Amino acid sequence: MTPIITAFEDSPDEGQGQARDMRVRWAFEEVGQPYDVRLVSFAAMKEPAHLALHPFGQIPTYEEDDLALFESGAIVLRIADTHPGLLPTNDAARARAIGWIFAALNTVEPPIVEHEAAEYLEADQPWQAEHMALVEKRIRTRLGELSLRLGDADWLDGDFSAGDLMMVMVLRRLNGSAILADHPTLAAYVRRGEARPAFRRAFDAQRAVFTRRHPDAGRD
Ligand code: GTB
């Protein structure tokens, strides 16, 4: 069967490709696997039918024959594992690429998410600025380290892999911020990922969901 994923019916990012279905869409596009999307509302995500697929009531989910998965990392890994193109064939290189998926999700993304949460959810707290400054420092440390590792290479370990896909997706959460701009090597790495035709197709597909729902958005 054609795999089916879930995505926001009305994403709060307004089509900027920041919701986590974008990672999965990009992976499908890289390997040339067609997919279907079931759009869900915030309310539907908390109903039993969706909770049976995703215990935390979130997107994305993935269904393929009798397999159901949640967690964008697990889904991208499944796609990369079952199609050529996103993981090296050499066993050690493949293990290292998978390691970069985990690095993106477990080491780089958490402080970025914490920074966003602090910005949006702690606005009425007197300690917000102090907290955000501390978390920003942690992000900057990680980006400095990552930047050193990437050096002048195009990708983290040889050819583009699912590890780069995930790392670019995590870093682009910082698009438009000085934190990323202050690390030009990483900013260029993100732009390189975003320039891939598969990224563009995935971006346009998720963007179309927003523009269909908000046809007048962006017009004067
Ligand atoms: N660890 C999970 C994974 O990687 O799949 C996290 C999944 C997750 O956080 N899903 C979010 C969700 O369903 C959407 S992507 N939230 C609804 C809920 O928890 O009730 C997170 C997200 C949302 C919005 C923006 N944005 O507007 O920029 C960016 C990212």
Image (cartoon, rainbow, N blue to C red):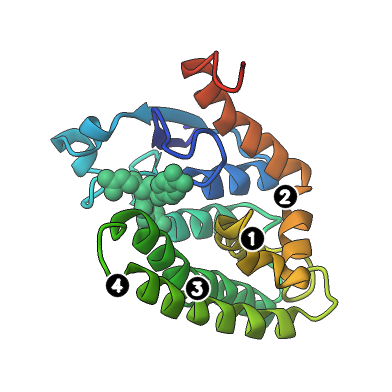
In the displayed structure, 179 sits above or below 1; it is: below
Residue kind at label 2, given as amino acid type = Glu
* Mark closest to the chain's N terminus, 2 or 1: 1
The label shown at residue 194 is: 2
**Tag of residue 102:** 3
Sort mark 3 into few (<14), some (14-19) or many (20+) by Cα contacts within 10 Å.
some
Q: Can you tell which of label 3 and label 2 is closer to the viewer?
A: 2
Give the answer, above or below, for where 195 lies relative to 173. above
Please identify, in this view, whether the residue under mark 3 or under mark 4 is nearer the observer: 4
Left or right of 183 in this view: 58: left
Q: Give the secondary structure at mark 2.
A: helix
**Which amino acid, by three-letter code, is at mark 1?**
Val
- Name of the residue lying farthest toward the left: 48
**What secondary structure is marked by label 3?**
helix
**Which mark is first along the chain, 4 or 3?**
3
Give how far apart the Cα atoms at labels 2 and 4 are. Answer: 35 Å
Mark 3 → mark 2, Cα distance in angstroms = 20 Å
Q: Earlier in the sequence, mark 3 or mark 2?
A: 3
Residue 29 placement: quadrant: top right
Residue 178's label in the rendered image is none
What residue does disc 1 label? 168
Question: Most extreme residue toward the right, as rendered?
Answer: 152
Residue under the image location 55 percent in, 32 percent down: 206
